[in-house]
């Protein structure tokens, strides 16, 4: 029975299943094992498709190394783009929740943030979902001293948490504050699952992480978690070369959407060339106050510094 | 033996107290410093065990006191390099008593500074990756290359300048030091006997290394400044950060040098060697640098304030709101005090100059703090959070203890080094009481 | 003794009846509701399927697909419900009954096919059933290039009980498949004679040869259900015409720009060269010292 709230992404099971089959096949087929010492102590824990944890000699898990290679290369012939319609966003925060759940994030770590922005005193406030923009001129990638973060051919910028040394230079390099740091130890981090940069699960203490456009789901032609979770259909996602973006229910031409609604990129003048476009919050479907409905007091207090919130009191 | 040799033997004679077996007070002092350093190590272990969450750094202000300390220590190191290199190259007449101190400052601060960057790193177990997987495009890699080059250069430079003195110590008989130290001096002296040929070679090498060390100091500190200025952060993305940091560094270095001079003068009773003239001379250097520093700072903030972009305005508001007193202290008092104290001849007293130097050091530490942290507190996208430690940065006890530990380590190394090699160059002359002519008896002058 | 046996028997009887009542009561509380939606799809190869989508709720009132439930399909043939088959719902909660192309569905006078799906219920799930009346239709399209214009001509028919009528006065949508969904590229209208045409848009991107798959689809029609037809054509812009060049030496690429590498090498050689010279001088000093010591 496949629940809607799926904690274990299928991709991981699929790859691990391949790995297990490959390993078992190798054993059963009696292929010649390499002569490197068979070290019992170096076994790796993996999750089988039945949900069991078994220990396997790492050399059977060649598939995991190729996972990292694949993660570096990206999905061929694609270039992903996201469009966020600010006229529809009501701060339902379902995108934040789905992302946190899908990536085993604690409640205080958010890859996707929703801010209340107001450009000046007299302009209209608007709810502003902010994932990582996967810029085409990523300053965060330029300043990383060890190459832990990299941009692939399909436009996605990933972080390899096995390489990250936690110097946080990329966090100062990003003008959009898209990256977060794992400051403390979390129990989730002790998961027996093998790490894959496309997945960002499990997390690691002392490393940087961020939105990855759910790169593991993209390999299965599934939309990112935030796109599917949004009840208002605010977030559109697609391949810019196909000129089509979808929010799960409607599919539109990217060029038409941007042209008709005057799409723009945030802080374009910084020269980062983001891959996320915004549609201006004109002709809102619902008033901005809707965004406060049903929120915890804690979250409501977050926006107290905007002129709108000050007037509200 | 000619009179010159007799003279210089007597100088060792007078300074021998510095390198012979230490007295009780010195041992107590060393133990005290070692305890502070151990406290620092304890704090470090706490940080490794509990994670960086026990520092004050959070997702917006990701670099806090550690980076400020890093910049500060590297700054005084490069100041030491520039001052000692300059004194040596231009054969400044009054340099002999103070040049060794400057050289020590160079090398010791260079050993302590990088420790602070290491404290900032989230995964210490992956430190070798900086070398194994280093990316040339990253300013941090430039800094790693630069600092390692600088450490090697400074060690060679220091070695070249103490070589002569080590040779003299080796030759001086009747010194009350341990046997292993005698052997060590002999080995380090490389058979230097002061012959013409050797002298020439030594001078040539020293001169070249002095030039190198000065050039490297400027380049390396600019690289450190570029770590900040190449990012897009509104308060950092400034074109003058390179020269600004270098000037601020040398400025703070003169302050540290004056303090060191005062301390050693008191502790070793070197009143005859380190005179008011030295204080005034270094003080004048400090005054000139204060003027430059004030000029750069004013230029920086005037530009930000006058044609103010939204984020520059936010930054200036934070500076004058939350950090008002630090700002006044570091950028006004820190600039004006040396100008007044050293500019007015009547105020040029040794103690006053030293107090000014202390003020300068603290002011410049705050200046670095005000460069790093307020910028990170005012990013382009507003910080919408309710946890106070995520909105504003304040250093926790771990960071302060480690700061104190670093300063204690600096003093500790200084003490140990100066017990090994005298704190002044051994051919330093005694100032004749005759005020009309100051005959300088110096040896090996080239 | 008799007294004791009676007591034990009474106690046992009460205990057993008490215990047996509890599951019944629990059962009644635990029966989950089931919602059944019945749709029909006709595919490109003219095969058809009937899909019963089963949804249930969990304890928190969240909707879930109901898997493993057996659905019975019936068709109305001459007034009688005939069992077509039984299918168990799969992991997505869909019970799919497939029919090959050309299957002869029994129709009434107006041409309607009446099917009925029922989930009879079990201990955990409630009964659910639904009925669907639909007409069998067929659509087709072809690509025609006329006077430099690229057009798609399409036609549709509705199968009645004994005859075939044109599919008239309805919409037909054309899509191209994209990575996550299908993008609509044209909207057409069946005229009275069951035919129509649309223009093939010029800004479609295909594969490297310019080939693209076009899907003609009617969705959620109240009479016809879902029906689609596919075809390939090479009228699209070839992909490599839009593919971008990936720069190889930028600040953010794995390999650094050439000028950076060259500058770094020059500077490092310059500096370390001087170091080596200084160390050489020291070495010379040592040698001279040794020579000086020789008697």
Image (cartoon, grey):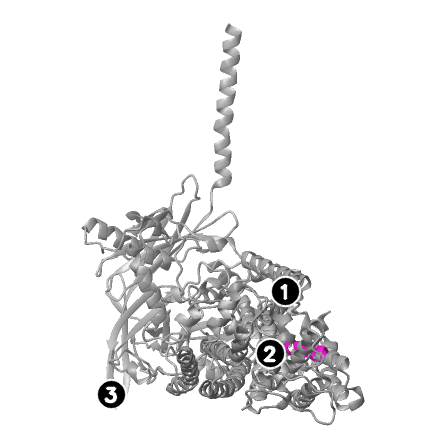
Check disc 1 and report the residue beneath it.
B22
Q: Is residue B61 left or right of residue C278?
A: right
**In this orientation, which residue lies closer to the viewer: B202 or B170?**
B170
**Residue C76 visible at all:** yes
**In this orientation, which residue lies closer to the viewer: B285 or A212?**
B285
Contact, CB < 8 Å: mark 3 with mark 1?
A: no
Q: Position of residue B113 (x, y in %)?
A: 56, 72
Looking at the image, residue B190 lies above or below residue C57: below
Q: Is residue B415 left or right of residue B322?
A: left
Check disc 2 and report the residue beneath it.
B9
| Element type where label 2 sits in the image | helix
Cα gap from disc 1 to disc 2, whole angstroms: 21 Å
Q: Quadrant of the C terminus of chain C?
A: bottom left
Could you classify mark 3 by the number of other residues whose Cα lies within 10 Å: few (under 14), some (14-19), or many (20 or more)? few
Range of magenta residues: B358-369
**In this orientation, which residue lies closer to the viewer: C173 or A85?**
A85
Q: Position of residue A255 (x, y in %)?
A: 42, 82
| Element type where label 3 sits in the image | strand
Contact, CB < 8 Å: mark 2 with mark 3?
A: no
Q: Position of residue C91 (x, y in %)?
A: 36, 52
Looking at the image, residue B56 lies above or below residue B158: above
Judged from this view, the residue extending furthest toward the right is: B346
Check disc 3 and report the residue beneath it.
C146
Q: Position of residue A172 (x, y in %)?
A: 54, 75
Which comes before the other along the chain, label 1 or label 2? 2
Cα gap from disc 3 to disc 1, whole angstroms: 105 Å
């Amino acid at each position: 029975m496949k629940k809607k709230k799926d904690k274990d992404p299928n991709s991981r099971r699929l790859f691990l299943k391949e790995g297990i089959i490959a390993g078992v096949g190798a054993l059963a087929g009696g292929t010649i094992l390499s002569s490197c010492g068979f070290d019992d102590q170096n076994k790796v824990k993996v999750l089988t498709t039945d949900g069991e944890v078994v220990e396997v000699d790492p050399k059977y898990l060649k598939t995991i190394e190729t996972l990292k290679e694949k993660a570096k290369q990206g999905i061929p012939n694609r270039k992903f783009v996201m469009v966020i319609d600010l006229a529809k966003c009501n701060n339902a925060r379902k995108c934040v929740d789905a992302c946190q759940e899908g990536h085993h994030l604690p409640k205080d770590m958010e890859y996707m943030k929703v801010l209340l922005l107001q450009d000046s005193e007299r302009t209209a406030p608007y709810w502003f979902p902010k994932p990582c923009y996967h810029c085409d001129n990523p300053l965060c990638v330029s300043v990383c001293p060890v190459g832990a973060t990299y941009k692939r051919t399909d436009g996605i910028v990933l972080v390899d948490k096995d390489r990250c040394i936690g110097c946080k230079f990329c966090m100062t390099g990003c003008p959009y504050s898209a990256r977060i740091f794992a400051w403390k130890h979390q129990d989730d981090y002790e998961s027996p699952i093998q790490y894959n940069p496309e997945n960002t699960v499990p997390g690691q203490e002392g490393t940087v992480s961020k939105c990855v456009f759910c790169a593991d789901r993209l390999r299965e032609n599934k939309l990112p978690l935030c796109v599917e979770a949004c009840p208002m259909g605010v977030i559109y996602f697609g391949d810019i070369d196909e000129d089509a973006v979808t929010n799960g229910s409607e599919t539109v031409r990217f060029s038409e959407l941007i042209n008709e609604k005057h799409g723009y990129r945030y802080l374009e003048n910084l020269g980062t060339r983001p891959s996320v476009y915004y549609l201006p919050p004109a002709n809102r479907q619902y008033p901005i106050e809707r965004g406060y409905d049903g929120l915890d007091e804690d979250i409501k207090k977050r926006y107290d510094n905007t002129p709108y919130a000050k007037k509200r009191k | 033996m000619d009179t010159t040799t007799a003279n210089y033997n007597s100088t060792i004679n007078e300074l021998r107290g510095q390198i012979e077996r230490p007295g009780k007070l010195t041992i107590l002092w060393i133990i005290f410093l070692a305890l502070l350093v151990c406290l620092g190590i304890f704090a470090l272990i706490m940080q490794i065990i509990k994670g960086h969450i026990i520092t004050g750094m959070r997702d917006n202000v990701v670099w806090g006191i550690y980076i400020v300390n890093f910049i500060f220590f590297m700054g005084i190191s490069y100041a030491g390099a520039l001052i000692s290199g300059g004194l040596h190259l231009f054969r400044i007449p009054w340099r002999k008593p103070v040049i060794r101190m400057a050289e020590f400052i160079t090398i010791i601060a260079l050993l302590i500074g990088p420790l602070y960057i290491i404290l900032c790193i989230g995964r210490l177990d992956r430190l070798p990756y900086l070398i194994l997987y280093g990316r040339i495009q990253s300013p941090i890699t430039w800094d790693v290359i630069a600092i390692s080059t600088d450490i090697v250069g400074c060690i060679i430079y220091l070695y070249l300048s103490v070589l002569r003195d080590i040779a003299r110590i080796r030759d001086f008989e009747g010194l009350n030091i341990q046997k292993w130290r005698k052997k060590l001096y002999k080995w380090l002296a490389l058979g230097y006997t002061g012959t013409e040929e050797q002298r020439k070679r030594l001078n040539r090498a020293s001169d070249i290394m002095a030039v190198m060390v000065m050039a490297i100091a400027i380049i390396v500190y600019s690289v450190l400044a570029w770590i900040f200025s190449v990012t897009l952060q509104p308060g950092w993305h400034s074109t003058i950060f390179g020269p600004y940091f270098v000037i601020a560094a040398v400025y703070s270095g003169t302050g540290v040098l004056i303090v060191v001079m005062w301390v050693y003068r008191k502790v070793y009773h070197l009143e005859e060697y380190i005179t008011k003239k030295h204080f005034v001379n270094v003080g004048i250097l400090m005054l000139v640098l204060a003027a430059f520093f004030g000029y750069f700072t004013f230029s920086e903030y005037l530009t930000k304030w006058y044609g103010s972009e939204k984020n520059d305005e936010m930054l200036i508001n934070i500076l004058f709101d939350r950090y008002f007193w630090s700002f006044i202290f570091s950028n006004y008092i820190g600039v004006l005090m040396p100008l007044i104290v050293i500019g007015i001849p009547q105020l040029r007293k040794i103690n006053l100059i030293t107090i000014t130097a202390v003020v300068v050091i603290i002011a410049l530490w705050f200046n670095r703090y005000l460069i790093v942290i307020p910028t990170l507190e005012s990013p382009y996208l507003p910080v919408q959070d309710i946890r106070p430690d995520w909105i504003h940065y304040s250093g926790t006890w771990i960071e302060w203890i480690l700061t104190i530990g670093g300063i204690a380590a600096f003093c500790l190394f200084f003490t140990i080094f100066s017990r090994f090699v005298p704190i002044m160059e051994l051919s330093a002359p005694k100032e004749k009481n005759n005020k009309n002519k100051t005959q300088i008896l110096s040896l090996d002058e080239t | 003794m008799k007294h004791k046996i009676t007591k034990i028997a009474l106690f046992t009887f009460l205990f057993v009846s008490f215990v047996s009542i509890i599951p019944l009561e629990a059962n009644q509380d635990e029966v989950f509701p089931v919602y059944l939606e019945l749709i029909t799809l006709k595919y490109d190869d003219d095969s058809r399927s009937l899909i019963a989508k089963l949804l249930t709720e969990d304890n928190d009132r969240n909707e879930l697909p109901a898997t493993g439930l057996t659905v019975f399909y019936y068709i109305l043939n001459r007034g009688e419900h005939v069992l077509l088959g039984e299918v168990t719902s799969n992991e997505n909660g869909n019970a799919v009954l497939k029919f090959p192309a050309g299957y002869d569905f029994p129709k009434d006078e107006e041409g309607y096919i009446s099917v009925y799906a029922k989930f009879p219920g079990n201990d955990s799930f409630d009964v659910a059933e639904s009925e669907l009346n639909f007409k069998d239709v067929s659509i087709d399209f072809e690509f025609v290039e006329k006077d430099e214009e690229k057009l798609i001509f399409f036609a549709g028919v509705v199968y009645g009980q004994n005859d075939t009528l044109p599919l008239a006065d309805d919409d037909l949508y054309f899509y191209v498949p994209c990575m996550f969904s299908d993008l609509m590229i044209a909207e057409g209208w069946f005229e009275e004679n069951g035919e129509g045409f649309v223009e093939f848009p010029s800004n479609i991107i295909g594969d490297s040869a310019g080939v693209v798959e076009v899907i003609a689809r009617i969705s959620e029609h109240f009479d016809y259900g879902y029906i689609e037809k596919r075809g390939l054509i090479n009228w699209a812009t070839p992909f490599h015409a839009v593919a971008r060049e990936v720069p190889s030496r930028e600040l953010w690429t794995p390999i650094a720009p050439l000028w950076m590498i060259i500058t770094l090498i020059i500077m490092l050689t310059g500096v370390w060269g001087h170091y080596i010279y200084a160390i050489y001088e020291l070495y010379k000093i040592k040698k001279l010292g040794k020579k000086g010591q020789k008697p």
